[in-house]
Each structure stands twice: as structure tokens, then as C-alpha cells.
Image (cartoon, rainbow, N blue to C red):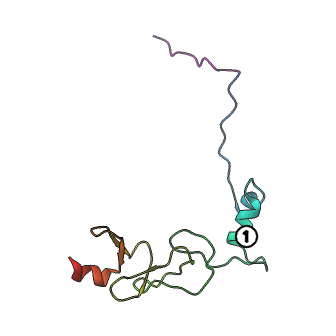
Amino acid sequence: MPKRSCPFADVAPLQLKVRVSQRELSRGVCAERYSQEVFDPSGVASIACSSCVRAVDGKAVCGQCERALCGQCVRTCWGCGSVACTLCGLVDCSDMYEKVLCTSCAMFET
């Protein structure tokens, strides 16, 4: 039995692999927002947040893994008050309100 031919032979466009670099991203649809989040006004790449990959706006670092955090991803431990990232912080939903616990305090809570 012969192989069936493609029904979209002449109509279908070619599917080529396209390499997208920083240059294309900075000129794309969300170019302004992308440029503001990733680049400083000087044009040099800044440090990215370890949780959400936005540009770090302060000097907050996780107390457990010491990764840089932006202001929106900072979580404060309910037990000891240390700063934790979304990877190292454990959210306890057992009470009426959510509590964030660092890995050290979470070990003693269970």
C-alpha cells in the first residue's frame, strides 16, 4: 500500500526553526516592559529575582539559599522572621490565615 500524500501540500507554510535572541525580545510586542524589567537605564543587565526573574529592586536575599529576591517575592517567616524565597518558604494553610515558614522552622512545626 503506498504512502498517503499530504492534503495540504502547496498551501501549508514551511515550519522552520527560528532562533530568538535578546535583540528580538527587546524589539517585540512587549518590548517596553521587557526592557524596563531586565535592563537598567545604563543598558547593562541587572540581577534577576530567583523566583520570578524580574529585576531585583532591593537587596533582599533568601536566608536559606542566599538567592536574590525582588520586593514582590519576599516572604517573611512567621516563626523566626527571616526572609525566604518561594522555593525555601513553606506556606502553612492549616489555620484561618496562611503562615510562611522557612525550612528551619517548618522542621520544628511538624
Mark 1 is surrounded, within 10 Å at the Cα level, by few (under 14), some (14 to 19) or many (20 or more) other residues, namely some
Please name the amino acid that badge 1 sits on. Gln
At which x and y percent is residue 43? 77, 76
Q: Quadrant of the N terminus?
A: top left
Relative to 32, does residue 38 appear above or below in the rendering? below
Asked whether, in this view, residue 80 is left or right of residue 55, the answer is left
Q: Quadrant of residue 109?
A: bottom left
User: For the magenta stretch, what is the residue range?
Assistant: 2-10
Query: Which residue is identified by label 1?
Result: 36
At which x and y percent is residue 82? 41, 87
Q: Quadrant of residue 92?
A: bottom left
Dominant SS of magenta comes to: loop
Res 97 seen here = yes
The one of 35 and 6 positioned closer to us in this rendering: 35
Q: In the orientation shown, which residue stands out farthest toward the top?
A: 1
Asked whether, in this view, residue 6 is left or right of residue 11, the answer is left
Q: Quadrant of the C terminus?
A: bottom left
Rendered residue at 66%/20% (across/down):
9
Question: Which structural element holds mark 1?
Answer: helix
Relative to 38, does residue 27 appear above or below in the rendering? above
Rendered residue at 53%/85% (across/down):
60
Magenta stretch encompasses residue 75:
no
At which x and y percent is residue 57? 63, 80
Q: In the orientation shown, which residue stands out farthest toward the front?
A: 96
Res 23 seen here = no
At which x and y percent is residue 86? 43, 72
The one of 9 and 28 positioned closer to us in this rendering: 28
Rendered residue at 28%/70% (across/down):
95
Q: In the orientation shown, which residue stands out farthest toward the left?
A: 110
